[in-house]
Amino acid sequence: MAQINTVDPNDVIDSDLGAPPPATAPAKDTAPTVQDGVPTDAPAALPETSSASPAIPTEDTYQQDDLIGAAEGVFGRSAQGLGKLIADILKKQGRPNGYIVGREGGGAFVVGLRYGSGTLNHKIEGQKPVYWTGPSIGPDAGSNVGSTFVLVYNLYDTEDIYKRYPAGEGVAYLGGGFNASYLRRGDVVLIPIRVGAGIRLGANVGYMRFSKKQRWLPF
């Protein structure tokens, strides 16, 4: 006898259709990304920026070659050891932002006097006339005249040069010679280098007073 199988018509219909595709989740409503006030679909990659710093302006100090050239213009190339002296000072103190070139004369017999005049060269404010006087006291005798070259440090306002600066030095001129001393008032430092002729020997303490006009009273 023929064998008859019972078939559910719903199963047959479902098998013809095949398995339904997997359900996909509805897209979520996401807020657009905003960059620099402009909506974007995705975060934009930031462009690479150069790590180099902006160009640095020229440093407001004088180079060694400029100072030695200016000093040789005052003293001449005959002052042996002058370039080495300036180089040694710059190595210890750094580069100045100003310098004074001028001439002075002085004398002493226990009590001494000094008068000078010159030009202040400032890296920012340019050139200014300057005069100075310098009373002193100490075991010092003789007289000398010559040229002066002053290295000026930390002078950010040229008006600050026109004040009194305590000074002390040892002097030894036997026909000629040069010496350097150190003056300071607040942050401003002055290092005068003197080359001159005369006969003078000793040591003294006092001050140098700078002014805009020539003064005959040393105090």
Image: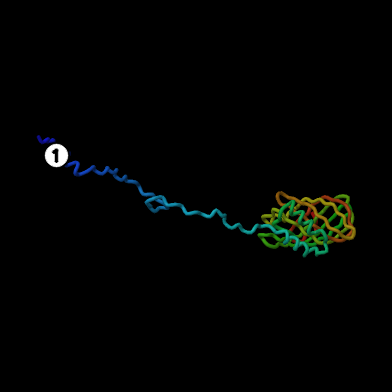
Question: In the orientation shown, which residue stands out farthest toward the left?
Answer: 1
Task: Give the quarter of the figure containing the N terminus.
Answer: top left
Q: Who is closer to the viewer here, 57 or 21?
A: 21
Q: Quadrant of residue 159?
A: bottom right
Tell me where residue 36 appears, x and y as whole percent: 42, 53
Tell me where residue 142 appears, x and y as whole percent: 89, 56
Task: Give the quarter of the figure containing the C terminus.
Answer: bottom right
Q: Is residue 56 left or right of residue 109?
A: left
- Which element type, helix, strand or loop, lies under badge 1? helix
Q: Who is closer to the viewer here, 179 or 215?
A: 179
- The amino acid sitting under disc 1 is Pro
Location of mark 1 (residue) = 9
Tell me where residue 41 appears, x and y as whole percent: 37, 51
Q: Who is closer to the viewer here, 144 or 63?
A: 63
Question: In the orientation shown, which residue stands out farthest toward the front?
Answer: 1
Q: How many marks?
A: 1
